[in-house]
Amino acid sequence: MAFEFKLPDVGEGLHEGRLVEWLVRAGDPIAVDQPFARVETDKAIVELPSPVSGSVQTLHFKPGDVIAVGQTMITFGDGGATAAALTAPVSGKSAVDAGKSPVSEMVAAVLSPGSAPPVMAAFPGRAVATPHTRSLARKLGVDLARVTPSGKGGRITDEDVISASAPSNQASAPPQPPPAPVAIPAASARPAPPPSPGVVAGMAGVGEEIEEVPLTHLRKVIAQAMSHSKHTSAHVTHVDEADVSELVAWYKKAKQRIEADGRTKFTILPIFMKAAVTALKAHPFLNAVFDEPNGKILLKKFYHLGIAVDTPEGLMVPVVKHVDRKDMVALAGELVDLAGRARERRVTLDELRGGTFTITNVGAIGGVFATPVIHQPEVAILGMHAIKDRPAVVDGQIVIRKMMYVSLSFDHRIVDGLEAARFMTDFVELIQNPDLLMMRLL
Amino acid sequence: MPRQVIFEGRIENLSILDKDGQVDKKLEPKLTRDQLTGMYRLMVMMRKFDEKALNLQRQGRIGTYGSLRGQEAAQAGIAFNLTKTDWVVPSFREHGVMMALGLPMHLIYAYWKGDERGNIVPPDLRILPASVPVGSQLVHAAGLGMAMRLKDEPSVVVGFAGDGATSEGDFHEALNFAGVFNARTVFFIQNNQWAISVPRKRQTAAESIAQKALAYGIPGIQVDGNDVLAVYAASKAAVEHARSGKGASLIEAVTYRMGDHTTADDQKRYRDPDDIAYWLARDPIDRFRKYLVSKKMWTDDNDAALAAEMTAMVEDEVKKLESMPAPTPVEFFDHMYETLPWNLREQREAFAQGDRS
Amino acid sequence: MSARTTDKTQKLTLVQAVTDALQCAMREDPSIIVLGEDVGLNGGVFRATDGLFKEFGADRVIDTPLAENGIVGSAIGLAIGGFRPVAEIQFTGFVYPAVNQIFAHAARYRNRTRGRYHVPLVVRMPYGGGIHAPEHHSESYEALMVNTPGLQVVIPSTPYDAKGLLISAIQNNDPVIFMEPKKIYRSFREDVPEGVYHVPLGKANVVKEGRDVTVVSYGAMMRPSLEAQEFLARENISVEVIDLRSLVPLDIDTLIASVTKTGRLVVVHEAPRSCGFGAELTALVNDKALVHLLAPVERVTGYDTIFPYAILEHHYLPDRERVVAGIRKTLDF
C-alpha cells in the first residue's frame, strides 16, 4: 500500500516550507526514520525522516519548490503496515473536527444565502419596545406597528400592548386604562399592571390549551432562510396546468422495464427534472444568481437541481449535480439515495450546496396549488403538484385526463413575467409531449 | 572590632570521570556491575527515546518537543538515587528522570503530542507534570519539601530547573523558603549553558549557580553534569541530607544542551559550531562507555544488543502512543473542578450536542 | 445548611468569625495549616489569625518570609503533599506577585493532569476600600479571579456567612479565593454558632424580598445596597436585595428567578466597572432573562480609575445615594 507523506508543521504555526534537497531518489529503498529530504522553514532547515519503511515511489516536488503544510510531498511504496497508525496527525483540528456534527452547518449552508446573515440597520418605522413588551405583544397577537406608543421616546409600553389587545378596543374606541393595581406602587415605579381580562384569556391557556414546542435548530435555520428569502426576492408565482396523460402512460411502460431487475426504483421525478433542465437551457435567466452588490446577473452554465425533501425534522434540499449529463435511470437512483440520507441526516455539506434551481413536490398531500419560496440565492423554484384525473376539453369533447398544476415562483427583480411565462409554456409543452422531450434532450 | 568577617563561602566542583572516561580512583563511588551497567542502560534509553521523539515531530506525529540530548548523565545520576516514593518536580526537559522512575514513555510522548492524558501519572509514582512557566515549579518543590518535613516522611523532593530559571524570582523564593523551613528538597539545576539563545553568562555575573545556595543558608555543589558518576555521588549526598531531615541543598550540574531549545528553535542562529564540537567530545554516554569497557564490564556486542533492545522498546511505546483512543473533546470540561458548576455543565452540554454558538 | 452546630452562639464581628472558622476547622482536621506574613505570633495584621499560633504551634500557623509568590507557590506544594493550606495575602493589592502561582498553577493542576492531582488551597485576602489605608491597600480584584477558570471566588458579607463559607472553602478540594471585606471586618456583630457549620458555596442569599427591582451585590457593598432598600421602602418601592456570597460558583437560579420577577436589575460592586463582575451578570441576564427586562441592567460600581488615596476614596466607593440613583434610573426608564 502506498503511503503519502504530507508536509507537517515542523515548527510552531508554520504554513509552508521550501524544499532544499531530496536525500533519496524514486525507487530507492527507505527505512523507518531515515531522512529523505531537507526543508527550509521560516525558522530553520530541518531533515524530514520517513515514518515508514519500503521504497520511494514518487517525489512530488523539485528542490526550490515551496510546499504548503498538508500537501503530499513524497509517496512511499510498501509502507502500509506502519502507515495505518499514521492517519491521525497531531497538529491541526482533526480531533475536534471528528467530533463535530456537521448537521447544523449543512442545514445552515443549504438554507441560508451564503456567508453571514445581513446586519439589519434600524428599520425605519420599526416600533420601539423592550424585549419584554415585544414578548407580551407576541403572546397576545398584537402587531406593534399598529400600537400607539405612550412611553418615553415613543416607546410602546406593556400597557399600550394590553390596551391594543383588549377585544373592545376598536379603532374608534379610546384605549382602556388598566385597572388600578391592588398594591399601589410609587409613581415612579411602573411594574407591569395586572393583566386585563383579555390578557387573562390570552395567556391562561399556555400549558392547558396552548402547547409550547421548543424550536429545533433545523427549524430555526429554516425560519431564518425563509424569511430572508421573502425579504430578499420579489416573489411572483406563475401557475399553469399540464395534461400529462401521455407522459404518465410513457412513464409506466418504462418503469416496468426498468424495474424488472427488482433492484432499481424508477420514479417520475427524473423526467420532470430533465424537462426542467431542457427548458432552463432555453431560458437561461431562470438558472441564475442575482449578484446585486456587484450589479451583475450570473447565468449558470451547469444544472444542479435542488430537490426539496421533507424530513421528520423539517425541510432539507439536497442537490443533484449535473442533471443534464445524467440519464433518467441514474437520476432516479441518485434521488433515492439522497432523499434517504437526507431523512437520516447523513447527507454531507457538499451535497446540500451549489444548487442552481430547485424543484419541490408540493402536491403529495392535497390542495390545488401552492406558491413555493425561492431557495436563495437562486432565482426560481418549480412546484410540482399532484397528478389527478380531471375533466379536460380535448378536440371539443370533455374527457377525463391526467392533469397536473405546476407553479413557478420567480424573482421579479431579474425575471420578468413574460420570461417566466415563456419558460413555463415551454416546460408544460415538454411534459405534455414526451416525444418532444425526447427530441430535445441533449 | 568594628569590621569582621561574618561569612565566608566556598563552592566545590566535583568531577570523577574525565572526558576520556579515565576515573579518579579516590573519588570513584562503590557501585556494583549491575548498578553501573544499569546507569548506562538508562542513559541509552533516554537517548533512543529522544531521537525517536525528534523523528516523530518531523513526521508530524507529535508536536513541539524539547530535546534532552547531552543531559543524560545529569538526569540518570540524580534519578539513580530516587525511589518511587520520592517526588519529582520537573521543568519541561526531565523526560529522562521521569522514565527512569518508571513513567511509561508513551505518556511522555502523549504530553508532547498535546494530550493531557500524558500527565496522568500512574498512582504509584509521585511525578508532577512538566511545568512550562520557567522556574515556577521550584516553589512547589519547596512546599512539598515542607510537607514531607511536617509529616516526617522520609521522602525527598527534587525540584528541577535550568540555568535560565535561576534568574526568576521563583528560584530565589523557593531556595529561601526551603532554607527557612528545612524542607526535604534537593534543587537540581541542569546548567546546560543556554536559555533558548541566551548564554549562561547573561543569567548571572556569579562564578557559579551553585554558590547561590550559600545566600539561602543551604549547601551547594557544582558537578560535571556529563559525568554520571559525579552527578550520582553529589546527588547521593544531597538526597541523604534531605531524607535524614537535615534540609535542602542545591546541585548545579554543568552540562550542555546538544540540540535546539525545542523543535521550534534553530540553535545555528546563535551558537558557535566549535562550541558544539567541544561538547560533542564530552558526550556523557561515550565517556561512560569507555569507563565501562575499561572495567571490562561492557563490550561492543553488548552495545549493539542494547541499542536493538532500546529501539524495539521505543517503537513499542510509539505503538502504544498511537493506539491510544482519541480523547473526547468534552474531557476538557470534565476536570475543571471536583464538581462542575452550572455554567460549565451548560457549556459542556451544548458542546456535546454540537451547538457551536 | 448547618452540619454540626451546637445550640450556643456568640456575638462576633466578621473578622472574629474568620478566626473562629479557622480555629474550628483546624481542631477537626490536622491537615489544615495557615501560612502567610505575620500570621503567627502577631495574629495577622488584621488579627484574623489571632490566637491560632498559641493553640496550634509554629508548624501549623506558619510565619513565612515576605514573598507572596513563595507563600502561594509553597502552599500549592503543601496541598499536593497532603495538606489543606490556608494562605493569607495581607492585602489584595499585594496579590500580583502571587498571580503566576494562582493562575498558572493552582487553577490548572486538576485539569492538566485530568484529575491526577488537585489543589485544596484557600487563599484569603482582605479586599476593598473604605478604611483610609495607604496606596495598594484598597483594591478589589475579584473579576481577575473570576476570569481564571479553575478558581472559585467567595466573598462573605456577614460574620455568620464568613464562618460558614470559610469552613466550606477549606473543606473544598479545589482552590478558593476567599476575599474578605475589610471595611466591615469590625463594623457590626451578629450571632455566630459555635463549632463547625457550613454555608455552601454557590448559594446566594435573598436578604430582602421585593417586587419592583432586584439589587445584587456582595461583600462590603451589601451595606449601601441594604440602606438603599430601606430608604426606598419609605416611598413604597419594593427592592429585592441578593447577596451572591460566591461569584464562582454562581447561584444563577436565584439571580434569574429574581430578575424574572422584578424585571429590573441593579448590580453593585466597588471594583471598576469595565469587565467587572457586573458586566458578567448583565450578560447572563441578557442570555437568560432578556424578555423579562423592563429596563436595561444598571451597574453601580467603582470607576475605571486607579483607586484614589484616602481622602478621596468616599467619592469612588458606591454609597447609598448612588445605589438609590441607580435603582431610580431603572424605574424611570
Image: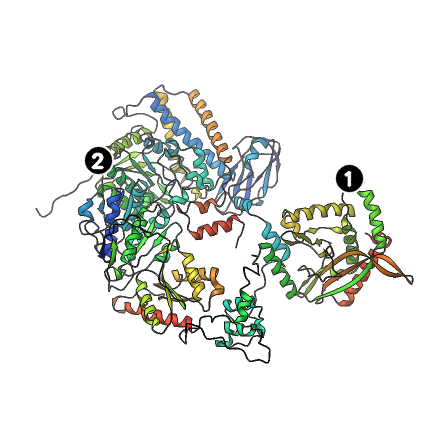
Q: In which quarter of the view is residue C332 placed?
A: bottom left
Say if A242 sits above or below A137 in the image: above
Residue lying furthest top: B296
Residue C330 position, x and y percent, is 42, 70
Say if A277 sits above or below A45 in the image: below
Which amino acid, mark 2?
A: Lys
Q: Chain of mark 2?
A: B
Which amino acid, mark 1?
A: Gly
Q: Is residue C251 in view from this perspective? A: yes
The structure's colour scheme is rainbow
For disc 1, the marked residue is: A262
Q: Residue at x 45, y 68 (%)?
A: C296
For disc 2, the marked residue is: B246
Say if B100 sits above or below A122 in the image: above
Q: Are marks 2 and 1 on the same chain?
A: no
Q: Residues within 10 Å of mark 1 (few under 14, many from 20)?
A: few
Residue B163 position, x and y percent, is 33, 42
The front one of A409 and A165 is A165
Q: In which quarter of the view is residue B101 placed?
A: top left
Q: Left or right of B57: which side holds C205?
A: left
Residue A415 position, x and y percent, is 73, 65
Q: Secondary structure at mark 2?
A: loop
Indicate which label's residue lies in the foreground, 2 or 1: 1
Q: Chain of mark 1?
A: A
Say if A171 sits above or below B50 in the image: below
Residue C218 numbered mark, or none:
none
Measure the C-alpha gap from mark 2 to mark 1.
89 Å
The front one of B27 and A127 is A127
Q: Secondary structure at mark 1?
A: loop
The front one of A216 and C72 is A216
Q: Residue at x 12, y 45 (%)?
A: B4
